Amino acid sequence: MNPELTHWTGPLGLPRFDLIRDEDFAPAFDACLKLAEDAVEAIAANPEPPSFANTVAALETAEEPLNRLCAVFFTLTGVDSNPAREALQRQIAPRLAAHGSKTSMDPRLFDRVEAIFQDRDDLDPQARRLTELTLRGLRRSGAGLTGEARARMAQIRERLAVLSTDFAQNVLTDERDFVLPIADGRLAGLPDWLLRSMRAAARERGQAGQVVTLNRSLIVPFLEYAEDRALRETAWRAWTARGDGSGAGGAKTDNRPLVAEILALRHERATLLGYADFASYKLEPEMAGKAENVEALLHQVWSPAKARVGADAERFAQMLHDDGINGALEPWDWRFYAERRRKAEHDLDEAEVKPYLTLEAMIGAVFDTASRLFGLEFREFDAPLWSPEVRAWEITRGGKQMAVFLGDYFARPSKRSGAWCSSLQQQHHIGAGQRAIVTNVCNFTPPEEQGAPAYLSWDDAHTLFHEFGHALHHILSDVAWPSISGTSVARDFVELPSQLYEHWLEQPEVLDRHARHVGTGEPLPAGLRDRILAARNADQGFATTEYLQSALVDLAFHTGAPPADPMARQAEVLAQLGAPAAIPMRHATPHFAHVFSGDGYSSGYYSYMWSEVMDADAFDAFLEQGSAFDPATAARLEEWILSKGDSRPADELWLKFRERKPGVHALLKGRGLLADAS
């Protein structure tokens, strides 16, 4: 086995990706799975009476080689996929699920942890919390099942692992294989900065001229600026066809039958454990608790958002007709006319803004904000990573290492879409302890030429801040055990740090310091800055409505009996909502990766808004003290939110920080929807 897969020897403890070959992974998985099975068996079969040290604590390190191998492999499948890695991922997914089932459903482990839980009063608070969570995890995994139910649960988990892998790879195939060449005579309305990005995308794929791909940082501005309505329709249909059998991959990448099977298996899994449906199972450990609480929140926001888009739709339809186009306002029209209105009402041109929003300047803003709030220091260093584009920083505070941070910012055909934060290594205090190695992955459009500045949109800059908010949850983590470290928290709490951090991008003092013209070095003019901030909610009705549709469809899929035809159920939910025809779901079911390429956000896509209720209120805590950088509030945020992981229940941590429950008022105010609320 290649030792670099489990014993990392790169700078500051990073893996040496330059020493890892695809053919190394299969034998490594064989070896590490055997090591993990043996270690877990030794714990389960230990003849000594169960104790926290020989059972719960031992489980925290039992699978360390396998965990490190998985961290490397699944990082690569997300950021740099290839046929060999995809094939191995399909092979290894059911094996990992089978191992997980065998471990988490072992009745001997369940009995040992339950015995420790009965005597938990003698444990320190974090050990007691870890024991409670371990027992809950074993119970929810089916450790209490017997006979046929037990065997069936294991089959379900293995099959779900296969289906979710296939789902994700199908979406990636459709995204990777679609390229829309745009002839020189059909470029009307496209700004120079977008044309440069389109030409760079063409060169990357060995083509001449300019192309549109399904990279969000490319296709969204194309839909905003392209005057050629037919091309907008073609691009929009390809973007929304991912995974539905009509995309670039054809019937081979049709995810609809996979979705139906996933939903059926999730429902069966929940009922085997005694729950009414999957939503009841999934929401039990979350802050929301049950589906009714989720629906209550989402519908509070749906009404004012729908009122806003109703007024916007009328205006955009009139603009469409004024252009001499008969017929209804279509989904491929909305962004185009919204951008035209934004420019007219706020005198805001993206070409005027982009020279101030270079990637380098915004990275500086992200790091400087973290330094001012939490005293962090950043030192970039060289390391052999998976792509020359990936950058590495050591993060310290007062001379002490806090974490290693990796940034992979540019879109590539081999990278899955979207943006995410993940960790190669979790913080903990076991033995000598270890600090986090955390990664932010984005899909920004690369510069036209190597060494040239990369320009971000306002949304891209928000994404950069959002993902680093997740990273801070890892960087500032200060707990004893890896299972409760960093972002290992309730799903509807995990977005609080990330969405809260976005607020600092919009602070004038941050923009004035960092948004400087790439050519002249001059700061962002105050007038332009004010126009940017005034326009941030210009199309908030659209953004809120498309998100809520996805969240409500996700919840409906998992509440009650599973739908035999998910697409029909999706249509039914949208009809009941009275969803605007020109605003589809943000993530249509066949490419809803949050929900179907794993179950992290299944019955949980609502969590972004649940967390937003808190993040809006949390930022108000700073403003109430007169400064977005109030040191006492920042210290409380670190103490009670960012450093605690899941060492205490999320609602307790929130109340420690804010000393009151959050309300929806701040969210509606932040989205500019307060006037539309009844």
Image (cartoon, helix red, strand yellow):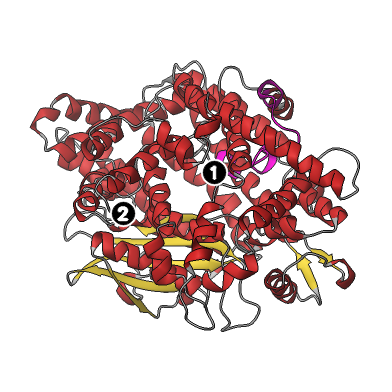
Compare residues 652 and 298 and report the one nearer the observer. 298
Residue 260 screen position, x and y as percent = 67, 30
Given the image, on which type of amino acid does mark 1 rest?
A: Pro
Which label belongs to residue 94?
1
| Contact check, label 1 and label 2, Cβ < 8 Å | no
**Magenta segment includes 585:** yes
Which quarter of the rendered picture does the N terminus lie within? bottom left
Rendering quarter of residue 307: top right
Residue range of the region highlighted in magenta in the rendering: 573-597
Which residue shows up at 58% across the image and 56% down it? 88
Between the residue at mark 1 and the residue at mark 2, the CA separation in whole angstroms equals 47 Å
Residue 205 screen position, x and y as percent = 74, 72
Instruction: Tell whether 651 sits left or right of 320.
Output: left
Q: Which residue is mark 2?
A: 628
Which residue shows up at 18% across the image and 72% down it? 399
Using the image, determine if residue 435 lies above or below residue 258. below
